[in-house]
Image (cartoon, rainbow, N blue to C red):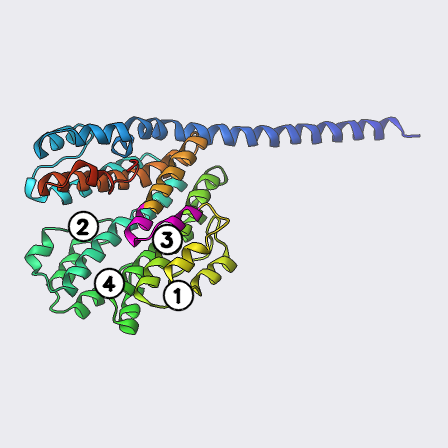
């Protein structure tokens, strides 16, 4: 039989353990509450700004307008500051980048750091634009009209690329940037298409590596959408390489949401685009089998990604979901606006313009 001292000691130990468990549980709840609180302000801003020109009714409203100036006046209300009508397309992109940067600055630390890496996508677009122009021997004064500095591509690097006397000298300038591996790809293949794919892969690799910056409460939403982004990237790479008859293996990236490593290997060994799309049977991407043209395939993938980003943004509306939704949707919104304005300028029918847009049923 236990003596009184032992009973008291056991009781105190039990009480201590109980208090410790309660503290741990409370701290877990407190951490979640603090995490939710840290997203309240940024998410409210994100939902207020939105990406309205990925929504059918708002897009149709623009398409019903009678002139480019009317469209430009309308989109200015949403933050697209077009001061130089001769550079409307570049100014739309710059406005998009500015709006995204403003939102990123409000995000909690881990998601903010991840989102800053996401901005590499826009630098990549500028780099590819310069390299394609240098490859086509476009005069440098014309290239300057189509580009702008980014988060990683400084004015110095951009100037060096455009002042280069050859494509080889221009791409060598990337040695001091996150895109330096593209130099080896060019030296190995001599293909501008392969360089494009390599730059896209670099962006995706950087995003995968940036997951380590995320805390537990932010990770799930971002991992889901990033997995879908990897699937979309891989399918696009497979289709592009299938068209130009190049080995795709070195450009693919594991870690997709539905397309795992064994299926990715099988798809990379397919002999044609038709076989690639047929190999997607049993996944959410099987709808692509009905499409023939590469542009249609890529556009359908973009629409799929936007839909999934919107879904995840709503499901994870009190954590990092809205941030990812905003990053993806805002990019497509800018692309839609450029297509609409170009359609007006070139006299393209509204029906044909609508078929080019992401977020609008064609």
**Separation of marks 3 and 2 at Cα, in angstroms:** 25 Å
Front tag of 2 and 1 = 1
Report the Cα–Cα distance between label 2 and label 4.
Answer: 14 Å
Where, by quadrant of the figure, is residue 346 drawn? top left
**Tag shown at residue 174:** 4
* Label at residue 233: 3
Q: Quadrant of the N terminus?
A: top right
Residue 78 position, x and y percent, is 20, 30
Q: Earlier in the sequence, mark 4 or mark 3?
A: 4
Near mark 3 (Cα within 10 A), the count class, few <14, some 14-19 or many ≥20, is many
Q: Quadrant of the C terminus?
A: top left
Q: Secondary structure at mark 1?
A: helix
* SS at mark 2 in the image: loop
Q: Eyeballing the image, is 250 above or below 350?
A: below
The residue that label 1 is drawn on is 250
On the image, the x and y values in percent for residue 80 come to 17, 34
Foreground tag (3 vs 2): 3
Q: CA distance from mark 2 to mark 1?
A: 29 Å
In which image quadrant can residue 237 be found?
A: bottom left
**Disc number for residue 149:** 2
Horizontal side, residue 153 vs residue 262: left or right: left
Magenta region? 285-299
């Amino acid at each position: 039989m236990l003596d009184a001292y032992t009973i008291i000691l056991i009781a105190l130990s039990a009480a201590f353990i109980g208090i410790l468990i309660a503290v741990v549980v409370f701290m877990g709840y407190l951490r979640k509450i603090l995490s939710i609180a840290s997203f309240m302000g940024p998410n409210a801003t994100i939902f207020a700004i939105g990406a309205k020109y990925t929504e059918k009714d708002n897009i149709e409203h623009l398409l019903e307008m009678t002139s480019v100036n009317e469209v430009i006046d309308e989109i200015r209300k949403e933050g697209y500051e077009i001061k130089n009508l001769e550079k409307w397309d570049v100014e739309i992109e710059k406005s998009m980048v500015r709006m995204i940067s403003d939102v990123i600055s409000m995000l909690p630390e881990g998601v903010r750091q991840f989102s800053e890496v996401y901005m590499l996508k826009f630098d990549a677009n500028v780099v590819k634009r310069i390299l394609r122009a240098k490859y086509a021997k476009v005069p440098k004064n014309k290239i300057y009209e189509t580009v702008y500095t980014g988060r990683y591509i400084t004015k110095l690097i951009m100037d060096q690329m455009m002042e280069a006397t050859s494509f080889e000298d221009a791409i060598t300038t990337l040695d001091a940037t996150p895109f330096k591996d593209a130099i080896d790809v060019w030296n190995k293949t001599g293909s501008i298409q392969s360089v494009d794919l390599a730059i896209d892969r670099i962006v995706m690799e950087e995003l995968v590596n940036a997951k380590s910056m995320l805390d537990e409460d932010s990770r799930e939403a971002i991992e889901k959408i990033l997995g879908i982004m990897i699937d979309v990237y891989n399918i696009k790479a497979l289709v592009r390489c299938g068209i130009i008859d190049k080995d795709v293996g070195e450009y693919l990236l594991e870690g997709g949401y539905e397309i795992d490593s064994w299926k990715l290997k099988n798809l990379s060994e397919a002999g044609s685009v038709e076989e690639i799309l047929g190999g997607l049977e049993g996944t959410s991407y099987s709808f692509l089998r009905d499409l023939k043209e590469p542009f249609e395939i890529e556009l359908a993938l973009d629409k799929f990604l936007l839909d999934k980003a919107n879904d995840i943004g709503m499901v994870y509306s009190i954590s990092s979901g809205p941030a990812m939704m905003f990053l993806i949707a805002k990019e497509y919104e800018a692309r839609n606006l450029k297509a609409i304005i170009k359609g007006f300028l070139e006299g393209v029918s509204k029906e044909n313009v609508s078929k080019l847009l992401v977020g609008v049923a064609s």
